[in-house]
Image (cartoon, grey):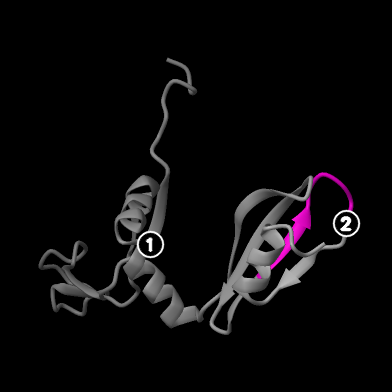
């Protein structure tokens, strides 16, 4: 087998969430300067453990609402920007982009089939009028 045939799982190293106390592997009842003859070592630095990236992704997908809530709590809210639709209006093709944030929603309409200035809408009624071809 060559190296390409053997695929290793991609892992991410994450810190373990706790400190640990382990038996001293050095002294085994002999004189020991490491554990000072207590027989135990205190690991003060959180150990790093490898976790397969696929498992992390699976967890995020299955718990997306809790993950989103934690991200919002820690980093604050960020606006959402999405293409809502591509519409044919007055013989032109337009992309309608929705921007949602805490302050509300607005829409940016870009012409796709020719060069034109983007249009901005702050109310749904104005956007609906434009989509029906009432505003040029």
Counting other residues with Cα less than 10 Å from the Cα at mark 2, is it few (<14), some (14-19), or many (20 or more)? Answer: few
Residue 120 in picture, x, y percent from top left? 75, 70
Q: Residue at x 49, y 22 (%)?
A: 4
Residue 114 part of the magenta segment? yes
Q: According to the image, label 2 marks what residue?
A: 116
Q: What residue is drawn where x is 82% and y is 44%?
A: 113
Q: Residue 14 carries which label?
A: 1
Which SS class for mark 1? Answer: strand
Mark pair 2, 1: CA separation: 49 Å
Q: Examine the image and state in which quarter residue 14 appears.
A: bottom left
Q: Residues within 10 Å of mark 1 (few under 14, many from 20)?
A: few
> Residue placed farthest to the bottom in the image?
103
- Residue 66 picture location, percent across and down: 32, 69
Taking the view exactly as shown, the residue that stands out farthest to the top is: 1
> Splitting the image into 4 quarters, where does residue 35 fall?
bottom left
Residue at disc 2, secondary structure:
loop
Left or right of 51 on screen, residue 81:
right
The part of the chain drawn in magenta is: 107-115
Q: In which quarter of the image is the N terminus?
A: top left
């Amino acid at each position: 087998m060559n190296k390409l045939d053997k695929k290793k799982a991609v892992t991410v190293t994450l810190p373990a969430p706790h400190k640990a106390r382990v038996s001293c592997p050095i002294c085994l009842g002999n004189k020991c300067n490491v554990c000072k003859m207590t027989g135990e070592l205190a690991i003060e630095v959180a150990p790093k453990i490898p976790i397969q990236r696929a498992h992390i992704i699976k967890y995020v997908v299955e718990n997306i609402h809790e993950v989103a809530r934690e991200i919002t709590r820690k980093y604050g809210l960020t606006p959402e920007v999405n293409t809502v639709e591509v519409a044919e209006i007055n013989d032109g093709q337009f992309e309608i982009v929705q921007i949602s944030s805490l302050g509300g929603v607005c829409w940016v309409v870009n012409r796709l089939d020719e060069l034109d200035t983007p249009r901005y809408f702050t109310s749904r009624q104005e956007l609906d009028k434009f989509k029906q071809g009432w505003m040029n």
